Image (cartoon, coloured by chain):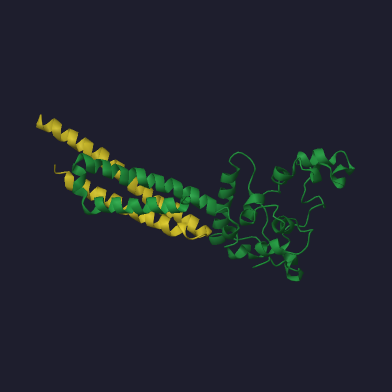
Chain colours: A green, B yellow
Amino acid sequence: MPGITTILISIIAISIVLIAIIVFRPSITATRGGKVLAFVALLVFPVLAGGMGVSEQMEHSKTTGFCLSCHVMEDYGKSLHIDDRSFIPAVHFQNGMVPREQACFTCHTNYTMYGDLRAKLRGLRHVYAQYLGTVSQPIKLYTPYNNRECLHCHLGSRSFEEGATHNQDPQTLPKLKANQLSCTTSECHNLVHNVSQLKDAKLWQEAGK
Amino acid sequence: MKNTPRLEKRLRISGSLIIAGLLVELVTLRWSHPTAFLFFLLLGGALMAGGILLYLYSLVSSDRTEADGAGTTD
């Protein structure tokens, strides 16, 4: 079965051929068949191609390669390969706890209604900062990291619910779940990308790469 | 009937704009980079939207001119 990209390319190619007929022989639109052809070629197919194109671009923008294609993100990509289990993104990436081809997006989207859209709007802000503004060094999140993004996967899992540290104080779990106690800044899982430590870090080499 | 060349001209421009937009879409489809996303959205989107709107306008304006012409004849 052909993929969405193949179908989209076919639709674009067919649209171009049909539109070219109208551009070179616009007089054919005087007939009923010509009018139908113009309607399909100049409205139906372009709207279909545009809609599918938006969907494809959104899928592209979720890939790790897309995020790391900007120079400023290179070190953050390398930090996924730090050979140290205490680095949260690295351990998630290397152990397949997040899909590797969508590693950035999986942790940096918002798991809310319209969360993907919000993530994409933030992405447009990144592009603006890259070309017209200034990129802060090191890169900082716009808002503190919300536990909701961690709990999307970890909530209900045995290691999270029954973990010794999480249950030492009976208030810890409720506070984590209510985002009153941060997973990443409460001195528990505070080693995230930490690109400043990258120079001295040993990097994991993925087998076959 | 004197509006026919104008209608044909509008259809030509509309078609050319949409083809340009589709070509931008085709190029950006094979290029996975934030700049491609922007090109697709701003350039491709604007060209296609412009072409489609011009086509719709040409339909409406040609209908109106035909109706006006019919009224004059009667």
A132 relative to A169, above or below: below
The quarter in which the N terminus of chain B is drawn is: top left
**A62 on left or right of A181:** left
Farthest-out residue, bottom: A200
Residue A79: where, in percent of width, then height? 70, 63
**A116 on left or right of A45:** right
Q: Residue A33 versus residue A198: which sits nearer the camera?
A: A33
Residue visible at 18% across and 42% down in the picture: A30
Residue visible at 36% across and 54% down in the picture: A13
Q: Residue A84 versus residue A136: which sits nearer the camera?
A: A84
Instruction: Judge whether residue A74 can be spotted in this image.
Output: yes
A132 relative to A180, above or below: below
**A18 on left or right of A32:** right
Residue B30: where, in percent of width, then height? 47, 60
Find residue A43 and report its image quarter: top left
Residue A40: where, in percent of width, then height? 31, 43
Find residue A149 and report its image quarter: top right
Q: Residue A130 versus residue A55: which sits nearer the camera?
A: A55
Farthest-out residue, top: B74
The quarter in which the C terminus of chain B is drawn is: top left
Residue A60: where, in percent of width, then height? 53, 54
Residue visible at 33% across and 48% down in the picture: B51
Instruction: Judge whether residue B21 can be spotted in this image.
Output: no
